[in-house]
Image (cartoon, rainbow, N blue to C red):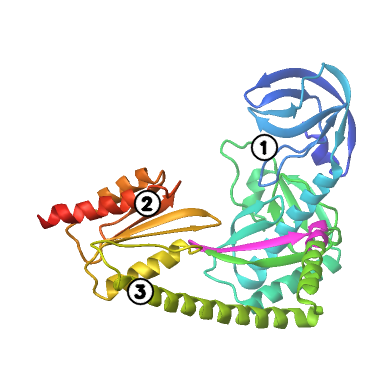
Amino acid sequence: MIQAFEREPSLRQLEVDVILVAEDEAGPYALLNDTVLYPEGGGQPADHGYLGSIQVHDVQRINGEIRHYLERPTKRGLHKLTLDWERRFDHMQQHTAQHLITAICSKSFGWETTSFHLGAKSSNIELDVASIAKTDLESLEEQTAIAILEARAVSAHRVPAEDLTTKSVRSRGLPAGHTGDVRVVEIDGIDSNTCGGTHIQTTAEIGTIKLLGTDRMRGGTRLYWVAGTRVRRLLANHEIRAAALREIFESSDDEVLQVAETKLLRLKEAEHRIKQLNTDMAKETALRLESSQGAVVNAHIDSADAGFLQSVAHQMTSHGTSRPGILTTTNDAGAFFLLYHGGNSDIDLVTIGNHVATLLEGRGGGSAGLFQGKAGALQKRKEAISILGNAISAKSR
């Protein structure tokens, strides 16, 4: 039996007979004598709707049955089945747009579609071409716009499977074990394609198609796009962001990009100056610490970050000091410590570092030359220095 969603794709409500109520691993479901709800398949998502007052949140074709999955069980008998038309019409726009894009890609550019996906926010098709030039994308979008303005008829009919070999019909093959007629969807003068999905009546109902860009993938290119009401939502979201940028940068649409680029350049220059200042400060700190006494270099540097401690340790090591050291700091993120061997590679810095991390109620990690981590407390900092000093003494005996 041909279901109502195929007989009358624009039908939004239908009185149906619930002939079975059951449950599987996906939840309670109902089998109906007829349905306006399209089951997921052929790349098109399932319709949603209501069976009486009970929400139908999924529709699947399983073992020859069309299962309507419900938020809760219902009773057998007559019920009113209502389609979520906004969701259905969106799917019809996206699906017909996919047929149109695929057909023009093939006829005008020789790119064949190997796969497609109708997503919740955007859709895509995969094409057997290594890359697509910007000018070709512009031409493709222009050709889809012309076909939409021409309001070409979109129709569906069934033909014997054997006729597919004699007719100019696009097909990626029939499902295994398919018997009987095959449904063909035609866009007048543009495309003829085997398809079981729901479609609009003319290309004009697509409204518009906006190509979003491409990604290279193994064996081809993935092309992203939106159609119909999604284009309006996309433009609305872009305008919200554009308005926020105009306010942030205190500039008009024509100026905002240049103003943002100028501010970004200044920010990068400031970051470079800050980085240079940090390097100079690390050098000065290292020079001061080199003149300190003792077998272990130790210092607590307030309000520094872990990166600054690393810079100081690097400066100490690069200046040829042979003394290992321990550096600590506290900042808004907490307390941190760093140990370095200072060219004294005889000491086991990883073992010492783990011991110090435990002592300081923290954790850390590192290598033979540097060990760093976050401390829970620094009250036992002197004991940590002693651990490093004792390790040096033990190696010198």
Where residue 318 sits in the image (x, y, percent)? 28, 74
**164 and 344: which is toward the camera:** 344
Q: Which amino acid, mark 1? A: Gly
Q: Which residue is mark 2?
A: 381
Q: Is residue 396 above or below residue 38?
A: below
In the picture, residue 159 is in which quadrant?
Answer: top right
| In the depicted structure, whether residue 385 falls above or below residue 286 | above
In this view, which residue lies farthest toward the left? Answer: 397
Cα gap from disc 2 to disc 1, whole angstroms: 82 Å
Query: Splitting the image into 4 quarters, where does residue 270 fall?
Result: bottom right
Indicate the secondary structure of the residue bearing disc 2.
Answer: helix
Queried whether the magenta region covers residue 341, the answer comes back as no
Residue range of the region highlighted in magenta in the rendering: 217-234
Q: Residue 119, position in %: x, y? A: 68, 51
Cβ atoms under marks 3 and 2 closer than 8 Å:
no
On-image quarter of the N terminus = top right
Q: Earlier in the sequence, mark 3 or mark 1?
A: 1
Taking the magenta stretch, the answer to whether it contains residue 233 is: yes
Residue 186 picture location, percent across and down: 76, 55
Mark drawn on residue 288: 3
Instruction: Residue under label 1, please give it.
Output: 180
Nearest the eye: 283 or 21: 283
Left or right placement of residue 129 versus residue 336 in this view: right
Q: Quadrant of residue 166?
A: bottom right
The residue nearer to you, when weighing 327 against 245, is: 327
Q: Earlier in the sequence, mark 2 or mark 1?
A: 1
- Mark 3 or mark 2, which has the lower sequence index? 3
Mark 3 to mark 2 CA distance (whole Å): 20 Å
> Seen in the image, is 307 located left or right of residue 175?
left
Amino acid type shown at disc 2: Arg
Q: Residues within 10 Å of mark 2 (few under 14, many from 20)?
A: some
